[in-house]
Image (tube, helix red, strand yellow):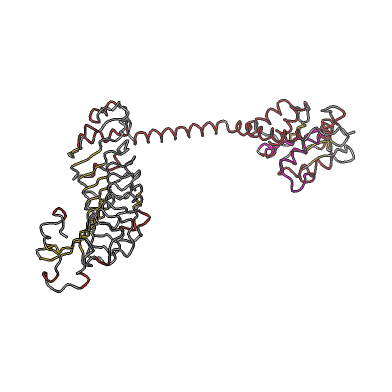
Amino acid sequence: MSAPTSMLTNTCPYPFNPLQINGTQAPNTTVCPHGCYCAYCRIFDKHLLSFRHEVYCNKRPYTHIPSASIPVDVSGLFMNQNYIAGISNDSLVHFTQLQKLYLNYNSLLSSEMDDHIFDNQVNLKLLHLDYNRGLINIRKSWFLKLVSLISLSIEHSVVKTLEKGLFENCVHLQTISLNGNQIAKLPIDLFHNLRFLNNINIRSNDIGLLPSYLFLGSPNVMRFFVQKNKVTTISQKVGFQELTKLIALGIQYNPLVCDCNLVWFRNWINQTNATLVELEHATCKNKDGISLVSFDANSLRCYGIAIITVISTCSSVVFLVVVSIIIYTFRWDIRYWNQRRLLRQQYERLQNEGPPPIDGVQVRYDAFVSYNSKDRDWVLKSALPTLEGPEFNFRLCVDFRDFVVGGAIADNISDAIKYSRKMLIVVTKNFARSEWCYFEMEMARTRMFDDHEDILVVVILEHVASRNMPTLLQKILRKKTYIEWTENPDGQKVFWTRLAAALNTPNAHHDRLLN
């Protein structure tokens, strides 16, 4: 069978006849697939005359690569327009000298392709897989050993996904053509570190965004075609300005949005020496389809990212400073409001339990003593012995003795205030600084407002400056008559008498008091 003239070079006129060459060919180079054409081609490699096999099996009914009948020294294998659906790992394993492989117009399916089909093709330079309607996913494992690959073409093959790191070992790639597929997203490193790469064709796909640093480590790109995709903007980070050898760029028939994000690219068009192919067909989707060339970037009021960042940062700092000043200035009010909120929740919980039955047991103590733990000596050695002694015979509630062991402090305080007729406040500098004392005062005040009971009795054990008191304590001292402690023995007799009288004053309906 004679080979079509279009498929042969002028250096490949010889039908297969190994004896005509040098008579030393091994037996496994003397075979040829049935119905195919095999020829030795004259190759000039560094001025040395040599011969390589080329095998033409185009338009044949093969459903797989006929590995057993292909010469092992084949350098060019053409199997276009067959019915091949898959390639196994051993289909090409013996063809270590293969330099050109054409499998266009077959039925290749990604699912039928093994992971390491090209592991022995370290000399392969041209790979064409066009018009295979089942190559949906292009896998990295196919390209791991293709270190000599120069040109790759996978056009019109319904490709949808490309694995990350696809060409990281194909360091000699010059041409990549993925035209006419359904690729929606490019891996960020697809064209990275390919210093010989000069032609890229990704036209007619579904690509919506060109990744930042698209050409990192690949400065020699001369032609880049991305027309008929879904690209809406091209930022400076893509890196066209780094391609000093760029001579042709195709971006037409994309739904470009001519806004501040496209200003850089519009201005770059005026500066580049590259030819923008059919630029008149590059239009602004959001500007009634006007030409990109007619888009006046200067008419937009756009602020640079740096300016926006500075403004945002300054605004955030100012906002934080203002908030900090407000919080510091009104810190006592904020604490007061928060304590009121917590106390209201606590008191509502107690109220939801229902009013205590009027059966003579609901009032357990004459007074709950609110004091700071640092003032315990006075409570323990003076207040308790005197007020609970035979002269006055009061029943007092104090934390270290009467609180439920293991119970929550807030619950113990709430119960103590609820089941005591009075609340005795022992004011000292320590008391004014105490969080729990503040909590106890708030709980007492809540009961006073809700039940209309005057339950507070205030003792000044130590003078405290107003500026060192929380707002609530200041209000209480302004409205309540307080009793001052004295170190004078005669004055102490008057103190205890006045205190006992204050504790005995009624503050609720008589049926709420202990009989």
The answer to whether residue 92 is magenta is: no
Percent x, y of residue 413: 74, 39
Percent x, y of residue 230: 32, 38
Q: Residue at position x 20%, y 69% from top?
A: 29
Q: Classify residue 63 as left or right of residue 450.
A: left
Q: Which residues are magenta?
A: 403-432
Q: Classify residue 111 as left or right of residue 466.
A: left
Q: Where is residue 41, by image quadrant? A: bottom left
Q: Classify residue 4 as left or right of residue 142.
A: left
Quarter of the image with the C terminus is top right
- Position of 293 relative to 224 (above/below): above
The residue lying toward the viewer, choosing from 216 and 374, is: 216
Q: Residue at position x 31%, y 53% from top?
A: 107
Number of numbered discs = 0
The answer to whether residue 427 is magenta is: yes
Percent x, y of residue 450: 75, 27
The residue lying toward the viewer, choosing from 340 and 258, is: 258
Q: Where is residue 232, by image quadrant? A: top left
Q: Where is residue 237, by image quadrant? A: top left
- Position of 95 relative to 184 (above/below): below
Quarter of the image with the N terminus is bottom left
Q: Classify residue 494 as left or right of residue 209.
A: right
Percent x, y of residue 200: 24, 47
The residue lying toward the viewer, choosing from 275 and 281, is: 281
The residue lying toward the viewer, choosing from 99 and 483, is: 99
